[in-house]
Image: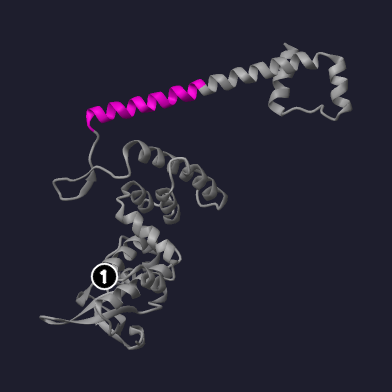
Amino acid sequence: MNDPADDYRVETIPIERIDVINPRARNKKIFKEIVSNIAELGLKRPITVTRRDGTDGPRYALVCGQGRVEAYQALGQQEIPAIVVEANTEDCMVMSLVENLARRQHRAIDLLHDIQGLKRRGYNNTTIAQKTGLTIEYVKAVLRLLHSGEHRLLRAVEANQIPVSIAVEIAAASDTETQAVFQQAYEKNLLRGHKLIAARRLVEQRQRRGKGLRIYKDMSGKRRERPLSSNALIRAYQEDVDRKRLLIRKAVATRNRLVFVTEALRNLFGDENFVTLLRAEGLDTLPGNIATRIQAGVQA
């Protein structure tokens, strides 16, 4: 079977005749850079489309290049160079996915949706893995994430809070195994700083409230998370209060232990024979914070 990309020709086509079959949201900053680059240097690579018969003449289904089309529109252009390929819907979907995977900074949520789209079109896991260059284990894990209703994890992936790979591992891990997932993600530099904190909070919410979200449609038809009821809100506040009380108890216990250790060491360091023995054994140093506390007590 020939690659559909091998049978093509380059044409200049009207932008108004292009149909974006699989539209994607655009980062405004990146889009401005695309517009500026095309305005200064011109179009480096034509878009890719496939011809379709329309009631009022030929139309073109966009395979790759939505950003370039929108940039041309923003610059007031009426036509755009395009590679016209002969391909069916399934081939177009695969070509679009390959283009998405080839991007240096593609959105993780697009990858999830594209894999799901291939599955809906009848491709099995092995074929999806071959066409995308992903491992079959990864494809299976991503589909399991989508099919099991992991809405909280999916929303975190869409918000770029956690990578797809970490979301998959969290979904497969038990409550006691998530700590190991975070540790590995930290060591691989996949989750650091505020992203690591946000991921921990996400897992806590997932454990307390479940993996799904309460979704409803507002008056405009948009899907939104249903607000918590008064009872659920009270429970959430109570859980938060209990968690803070536990932290306070741990902090008090830690402080008491530190005071005990400091006082014990201060008394021991008052014994000259004990100090001489420590020096002889090469054990005459202390952590800076404890040494400062002991010194402050001696001066007092």
Instruction: Residue at 54%, 49% (x, y): give it.
Output: 184
> Can the viewer see residue 251?
yes
Q: Is residue 235 above or below residue 268?
A: below
Amino acid of disc 1: Arg
Q: Residue furthest top?
A: 300
Task: Give the percent coordinates (x, y) of residue 130.
Answer: 41, 73
Q: Residues within 10 Å of mark 1 (few under 14, many from 20)?
A: few
Which quadrant of the view contains residue 8? Answer: bottom left
Which quadrant of the view contains residue 260? Answer: top right
Which quadrant of the view contains residue 106? Answer: bottom left
Residue range of the region highlighted in magenta in the rendering:
229-249
Nearest the eye: 300 or 263: 263
Magenta-drawn stretch, dominant element (helix, strand or loop) = helix
In the rendered view, does 55 fall on the left or right side of 76?
left
In the rendered view, does 92 fall on the left or right side of 136?
left
- How many numbered marks have been drawn onto this rendered protein structure? 1
Task: Give the percent coordinates (x, y) of residue 223.
Answer: 21, 49
- The residue singled out by tag 1 in the image is 121
Q: Is residue 69 above or below residue 230?
A: below
